[in-house]
Each structure stands twice: as C-alpha cells, then as structure tokens.
C-alpha cells in the first residue's frame, strides 16, 4: 500500500509528528503490515453498525467525497491527464471500481492499494475539492507506475521512487516556496529537492517499519533518476491551471486517449 499523509501541502512539521505517532501506535499493534492499518474499511469482513456510521457521520462524508471525485475526474487537468495515460497503457480508470471513499485512521488522506487496484480517498480527512483532486492525482500516479513499470510496493527502492515522483509532481509547489519566502532565485532547486525528499521520506515511513536513516539512504540512492522522471505529466508541480491545461493538451500527442 502507498499512503498519503493528511494535509499534503504546507503542514509538514505538524504532520510529521502526527504520522510518527500514528506509526508508533501501528508498530505496537502489528509488524510490517505495509500501511493497511490506516484503512480499516479495506477489511470487508468488518461491517459497521448503522449507529456507528451515524456517529462518525460516514454517510455525509461519503456523499461529499463522491461529489468531489466526480468533479475532479471531469474537470481537473492533471487528474484527466493521468486517467488518459493509464488508459493508453491498458489500465483504464473506472471510477466506481477503482476509486473508493472510505473512513481512515487519522493521519492519512489517501492511498493506493495494489491488491485491489484501488485508489482510497479518506472521506473523513479530505476537507475540500482541491485537496481531493490532488490526492487522486498523487494516487493515480502510483497506479500509473504500477501499470507501466510493475512497481513492487513492498520493495523499498521501488516505493521510494514512486513517492519521489508523486511528491515532485503533486506537492512542493515552487510558487508556494517563493511566496512563503523559503526559496530564492538562487536556492530554488535545492529547496525544491529537499521538499521532495522530505515528502517522500514521510510517505515511506508511514507504511514501512524502517528507521529514518534507512529511508533517507534509499531516497538518496534513487533520487536523481526518479526526480528527473516526470512521466506522464512532463512537468514539476504547478498550481497554475493554465500550465496544467497545457500539460493535458501536450500529453494528447503522446498518449492515445479522448
Ligand atoms: Zn504516495
């Protein structure tokens, strides 16, 4: 399973603490479950009662999440581009079959489950449509790597590579770094690479029982190759809709989809 930490953009420090806590709790419960701990609804044998669902406001969250999904699939350029690229590789996305809104353990906002070939969206933690579209895009990128390159999510190097690619294309926006004053013209590249490394590190440690040093070593080993592989989007993270639309139009030259 590849998991996305909650609040994927600008709350890294707070989030790292949350995830580390969640990870410690998880480690006590199970040994190396590859992140399935965070997605209790994946276990279809465990059915929740009506009262439990009402208590958690599950039906309300579920309806909102599915509304966001429909909107993202219809109109978000990066999500459309990925769905098109997947189709051209022989892995078409059927929304009802491959995208699932579920209640997750706090600390994650989504994931990709290679066993069921499903993108999981955490209906209880995703706050709005834009975040939802970004999570769908991030997880569809994992699906794309699984479809294109048969990524083995239990292999640390493979996991590091696909997480670097997802962070590169869906988080760590260059514009946000400038706006917050973190990056200048002279250090933009270093700041961006550091952000991508940190984000990938966080995602790896969420689903694997490895030390920070082990995860950092693997990220460093595969970084250059995976950071420079921006398929199928062909660009680094951007929030500008105009650039996203151009990426979608250009991709039609390379991938065969409507
Ligand atoms: Zn991921």
Image (tube, grey):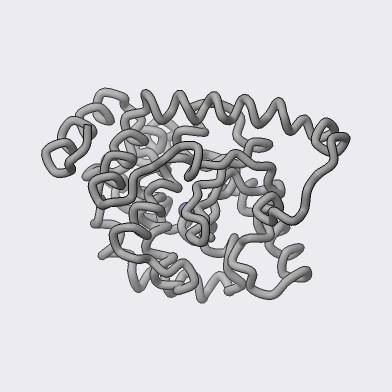
Residue 241 to residue 22: above or below: above
Q: Is residue 117 left or right of residue 102?
A: left
Q: Residue furthest left?
A: 253
Q: Quadrant of residue 172?
A: top left
Q: Is residue 63 left or right of residue 254?
A: right
Q: Is residue 100 left or right of residue 27?
A: left
State the residue at coordinates (40%, 54%). 142
Of residue 234 and residue 254, the one placed in the foreground of this image is 254
Residue 4 is situated, as x and y percent measured from the top left of the image, at 54, 50
State the residue at coordinates (35%, 49%). 168
Residue 19 is situated, as x and y percent measured from the top left of the image, at 65, 55
Residue 62 is situated, as x and y percent measured from the top left of the image, at 65, 31
Of residue 150 and residue 187, the one placed in the foreground of this image is 150
State the residue at coordinates (42%, 40%). 94
State the residue at coordinates (49%, 71%). 154
Of residue 184 and residue 3, the one placed in the foreground of this image is 3
Residue 233 is situated, as x and y percent measured from the top left of the image, at 26, 43
Asked whether the viewer can see residue 206, the reply is yes
Q: Quadrant of residue 180?
A: top left
Residue 236 to residue 216: above or below: above
């Amino acid at each position: 399973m590849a998991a996305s930490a909650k609040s994927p953009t600008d709350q890294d420090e707070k989030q790292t603490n949350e995830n580390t806590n969640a990870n410690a709790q998880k480690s006590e419960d199970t040994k190396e479950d590859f992140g399935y701990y965070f997605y209790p609804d994946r276990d279809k044998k465990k059915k929740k009662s009506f009262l439990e669902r009402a208590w958690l406001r599950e039906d309300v969250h579920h309806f909102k999440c599915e509304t966001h999904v429909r909107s993202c699939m219809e109109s978000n350029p990066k999500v459309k581009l990925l769905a098109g690229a997947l189709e051209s590789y022989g892995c078409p996305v059927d929304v009802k079959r491959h995208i699932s809104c579920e209640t997750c353990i706090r600390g994650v906002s989504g994931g990709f489950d290679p066993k069921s070939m499903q993108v999981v969206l955490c209906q209880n933690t995703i706050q709005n449509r834009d975040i939802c579209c970004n999570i769908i895009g991030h997880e569809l990128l994992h699906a794309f790597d699984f479809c294109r390159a048969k990524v083995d999510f239990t292999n640390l190097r493979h996991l590091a590579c696909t997480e670097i690619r997802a962070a590169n294309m869906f988080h760590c926006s260059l514009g946000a770094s400038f706006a917050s004053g973190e990056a200048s013209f002279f250090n933009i590249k270093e700041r961006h690479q550091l952000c991508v490394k940190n984000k990938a590190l966080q995602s790896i440690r969420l689903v694997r029982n490895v030390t920070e040093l082990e995860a950092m070593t693997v990220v460093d080993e595969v970084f250059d190759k995976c950071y420079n592989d921006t398929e199928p989007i062909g660009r680094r993270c951007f929030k500008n809709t105009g650039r996203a639309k151009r990426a979608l139009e250009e991709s039609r030259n390379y991938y065969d989809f409507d």
